[in-house]
Image (spheres, rainbow, N blue to C red):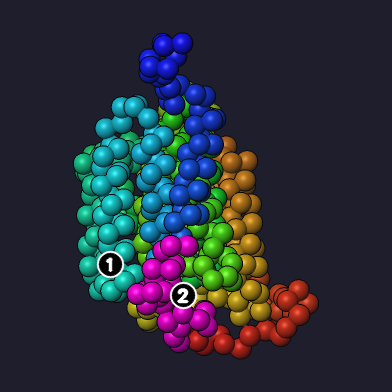
Amino acid sequence: MYSVLFNPVVFDIYSVPLYLMLIFAFSTGLIVSWFTIPPIVALANAKKLYEEPNERSAHKIATPTLGGLAIFAGFKFSYLVFSGQTELPERPFIAAGCLVIFLMGMKDDIFVLAPIKKFLAQIFATLLVVFLGNIYISDFQGLFGINEIPYWASIVFSFFVVIAIINAFNLCDGIDGLAGSLGNIAAVTFGTWFALAGDYVYAIMCFSLAGSLIGFLRYNLSNGKNKIFMGDTGSLLIGFVIAIATIRFIELNRSPLIEHHVSSAPAVAIGILFIPIYDTIRVMSARIMRRKSPFKADRGHLHHKLLDLGYTHPQATLMISFTSVVFIVLSFLLQHIGILQLLFVLTIIATAWYLIPVTKWARRISSKVTGKPRSVETGKPCC
């Protein structure tokens, strides 16, 4: 009896099966973000830390933009607790990079930073993980006939990849639920593959992010008193974490001996992120063709076109998210046809799908589905 009461009972949480750890990580991220958002909203309203509607907004009422704080809290708490005692040299640099993104995003959401300052913070965070953390793409795996590339080229190319993915998610955060849903889909996809491949820590990282995003989406997609936006803090953090997962996914698949090896890994990784990547490239290219700055905001994104057809934010988010899942499934099913061939197929399908919202047929269908005529606010600028 004495030994039961006074001897310590040792419980090693890291000894439980991996699938339980993934459930714990996902659930913890969800719970933390779910329960931190109401007090964040109360604080934001008390201090008037919200976004007032303007000519660029797709919303009509003032809404707090500090949802990224809850996403960061849920993700970091869960990731640090459940990533275990496994040696991972790059982990402190990932944590430091996330902190840089978080601090910059929070300051921008509250005070609004100059674009150059935001970009410099992204550069610093990216250098932490690419240069110091040695998270970089070292092999093109046959793309354009190129395989292993020099170290300096790996650093430069990976730097560009991380910056591009960060801003792709930032630009797709234009309607309720979109960036969170696309980030969640990518995180679950990468996390599932990491788990199957035995990459414990990165699986935990992805599922921690996925859980925190679900907790956020519960409020972001509602119209209740606790409605909140993720702001730049959330969208930039999603892009940063997903960029790290993307590089890890490509690098692990260099070896055909790895369990659940994926052929054409660079193309499959692009397929997992195809919607935000393609939409960003398409919109910026269109702006350049019109002789405008590629960074000048307009209503050229796909989600704007769906809103102009009369769809609500949840409807547009659901349609785009479903399409993202279709691209992911196609990428894995067609992985054996080759990198360039797979990218070509995905691009052709995406181009055709992006043209649908501007057809008369699509306008007729949307009128029947939504029960209202097509919006005429196509000239209204937005983010």
Q: Amino acid at mark 1?
A: Lys
> Looking at numbered disc 2 in the image, what kind of residue is underneath it?
Thr
Q: Left or right: 332 with respect to 238?
A: right
Task: Let me know if residue 182 appears in the view.
Answer: no
Judged left or right of residue 310, residue 75 is left
Can residue 138 be seen from the camera position used here? Answer: yes
Q: Looking at the figure, which quarter contains the C terminus?
A: bottom left
* Stretch in magenta: 38-65
**What is the distance, in whole Å, between disc 2 and disc 1 at their CAs?**
17 Å
Q: Is residue 143 above or below residue 21?
A: below
Give the residue at x 26% y 32%: 89
Q: Quadrant of residue 65?
A: bottom left
Query: Is residue 37 depicted above or below 243 in this figure?
Result: below
Residue at (57% x, 87% y) in the render: 377
Identify the residue under disc 2: 63
Which residue sits at x=40%, y=60%? 68
Is 51 in the magenta?
yes
Q: In the image, what residue occupies the spot 44% across and 67% down?
A: 41
Where residue 163 appears, as percent x and y from the top left, is 33, 57
- Circle 2: element type: strand
Viewer-closest of 42 and 63:
42
- Give residue 298's position: percent from left, percent from top: 45, 80
Q: Residue 108 placed where, x, y %?
A: 30, 69
The verdict on residue 197 being magenta is no
Residue at the disc numbered 1: 107
Q: Which SS class for mark 1?
A: helix
